[in-house]
Image (cartoon, helix red, strand yellow):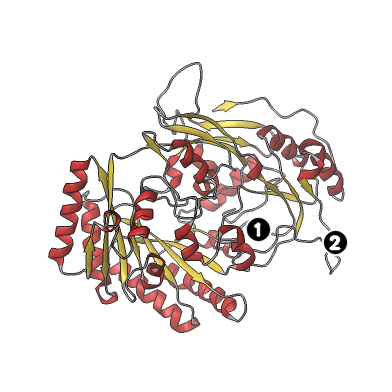
Amino acid sequence: MTVLPEATAGHEVFGPDDLGAVLDKAAQVVGADRVIYPEEAADGGPSTPLGPNVSLYRSRTVFGVVRPQTAEEVRRVVGLFADGRTSARLHTFSTGGNWGLGSREPAQDGAVVLDLSGLDQIRDIDVAQGWAVLEPGVTQARLARLLEGSERMLNVTVSSAGTSVVGNALDRGVGLRHQRVEDLTGLEVVLPSGELIRVGWWPDAGRTTPVYSHGLGPSLVQLFVQSSLGVITAATVRLLPRPEDLRVVRLNFTPDKVEAATAEVQRWVSQGLSRGVVKIYNEAAAKAYDSPAGQYLVHVCVDGTAEAVDALSGIVVTEAVRSGLFTTVTDRDARDPDAPNHDIAVRVERAYAGDPDPTDVLFEAKMGRPAARLDEEGGFLFFLPLVPFTGPALARVDELVEQVRVETGTRCGVTLNALGPDLVDCVVTMKFARADDEAERAHRALDRLHELFVAEGFIPYRLGIEHADWADRLSAGTGARAFARLLKDAVDPHHVIAPGRYA
C-alpha cells in the first residue's frame, strides 16, 4: 500500500448548521460554477437537484452537488467534511449511469453529492503489459477507441458505451468476458480523513513488476468494492489479450426446453468449448436481438486462432444439432450479409471483441431510447440474483418469473450470464411506461422477485436504493455485517461517506 501526502493539517471546523459555509469552501476548491447549492423546494425543504431517475425511485433530498475535476480537489473537498460536524454526508457517482438501481441517487436523504464525471483522464496505459490507469469519468467507449487496432482490448459490458469503466467494476458489473471486478488490480482512494492512498498493484516508474492485485498481506482492493469506506479517484484496470479471431454461435430453443437446453449449454461451458460469458435470453429479452418470437436465444462465443475458432465453433454447432434441443443453430450470421439479423450479429461479435459500439444501437433497441434521455423518459428496474448453473435451477428461474407475471402483470426480461460452469448472473429487467400504473406494478414485481428468489436461495449480488436494507438480511457469514460496521467505524468514525446500498 502506497501512502500519498496527507491532507492539510487542521481541517476547517464547521457547526452542524454551517453546510452553506462548507459548500462555499468547496466552491473555492473546485470553482463556483462546479457547485450546485440546494434551492428551497415547495414544501420549504431542500430541493433534489439530481433530476429524475429511470426507475422512478423516490428522489432523495440532496444538500448540494460538487463536481471536482482532479483527485487533489476530491481530497480537499472530503477534508472539509472530515470532522463530521456538518449536517450532510458525501455520496459519489462516476457518470451516473447506474440505471435500474438508482441512477445518480443516494440510498438515503441528506447527502452532498460528489459528481466524479469530471475526473475523466486516462492517466497512464501500457498495452504490452496489459493495464491502464483510469479515472471514474472515463467511459468504455473512450478506452475502447484508444485500444482500437492494438493487441489488447477492454472487457466490455453491454450497457451504454458512455458508462464508466471504474464505476461499473466497483459495483461488480458483468462484462462479456467475466465480472469486471476481476479487472481491478489497484485503486486510488481518498479516505474519509482526506488522506489519499493507493492499494493493490500500481505502476511504478522505478521498477517493473508484473500486474498482481493481491500484493503482500491482506488484499485491500476488494475492501473498497461495494463499500462506503472511501472515494475512488482512479483505478488500475486490466486490458485483456485481443483474440486473433472470434465467432458467436447463435442458438434458439422453445420455453419447454429450458431445463434440457441450459443443461446442454452448461456442459459445453464446463468442457471449455466457449470463451467469455455465454448469454441466454428469455423470450422478452431476446426481442432486441430480432430473435424468433416466443423463443429463447443463446450466444456462445468462441475465439483464439483462426484454426481454433473454426474447430470450436464447428464442435458447438455439431453438439447443438446432435442434441435435438435447438430450433436454430448457426455461426454464420455475422459473415453472411444476407442473414436476416446480420447487422445485430456483427455488433454482438464486435462487443465480445472489445468494441462497445459508440452508436449504442443495441442498447437503444433494448431500452427504447438513447442513454442521454433514459432517466428523463424511460421506465426500468433491475433485479440481479446469482443462480446455480444447472438445468433445474434455471428452469426454476423461469417458473418464478412467470409467477411474478401472473401476480403483478409485469412481464420480465431475463438474461442469464454464465460466469463459469457453476454460476449464472441472472439479470431480470422490468420495463414500464410512466404514463399509467405500470410503474407501480413493476415496483411490486421487484419486491416480489426479492422475496421469491431469496426464499429459493438465489441471492442478489447488487441492490437498488430501495432495497439497501436487504444487505443485512442476506449476509452469509456469522458476524460478517458486524465486522463490516466495525471497519466502517474505524476508517470513518464520523461517517463522512454516506451509507450506500451495501452499507
Relative image position of residue 137 (x, y in whole percent): 59, 43
Residue 283 or 490: which is nearer the viewer? 283
Of helix, strand and loop, which one carries label 1? loop
Residue 234: image quadrant is top right
Residue 453 relative to residue 487: left or right: left
Can you say whether 283 is above or below 204 in the image?
Answer: below
Q: Which mark is residue 368?
A: none
Q: Position of residue 475 (x, y in %)?
A: 49, 57
User: Pointer 1 and pointer 2: residues touching (CB < 8 Å)?
Assistant: no
Element type at mark 2: loop
Residue neighbourhood size for the residue with mark 2, other residues' Cα within 10 Å, grouped as few (<14), some (14–19), many (≥20): few
Instruction: Decide which of 97, 244 is in the foreground and name it.
Output: 244
Q: Amino acid at mark 1?
A: Glu
Q: Position of residue 105 (x, y in %)?
A: 65, 58
Q: Determine whether 404 is above or below 246 in the image.
A: below
Q: Is residue 169 left or right of residue 69?
A: left
Quarter assignment of residue 47: bottom right
**Residue at 78 percent of width and 36 percent of height:** 29
Residue beneath the point at 40% across and 72% down: 284
State whether residue 383 appears in this view: no
The answer to which of 198 and 265 lies nearer the viewer is 265
- Between residue 158 and residue 416, name the one nearer to us: 158
Q: Which residue is mark 2?
A: 40
> Nearer the N terminus, badge 1 or badge 2?
2
Circle 1 residue: 105
> Does any portion of residue 321 appear in the rendered image?
yes
Q: Residue 393: x and y, percent?
A: 31, 67
Q: Quadrant of the N terminus?
A: top right
Tell me the kind of residue under disc 2: Glu
Within the image, what quadrant is residue 44 found in? bottom right
Outermost residue on the left side: it is: 322
Rendered position, 122 above or below 368: above
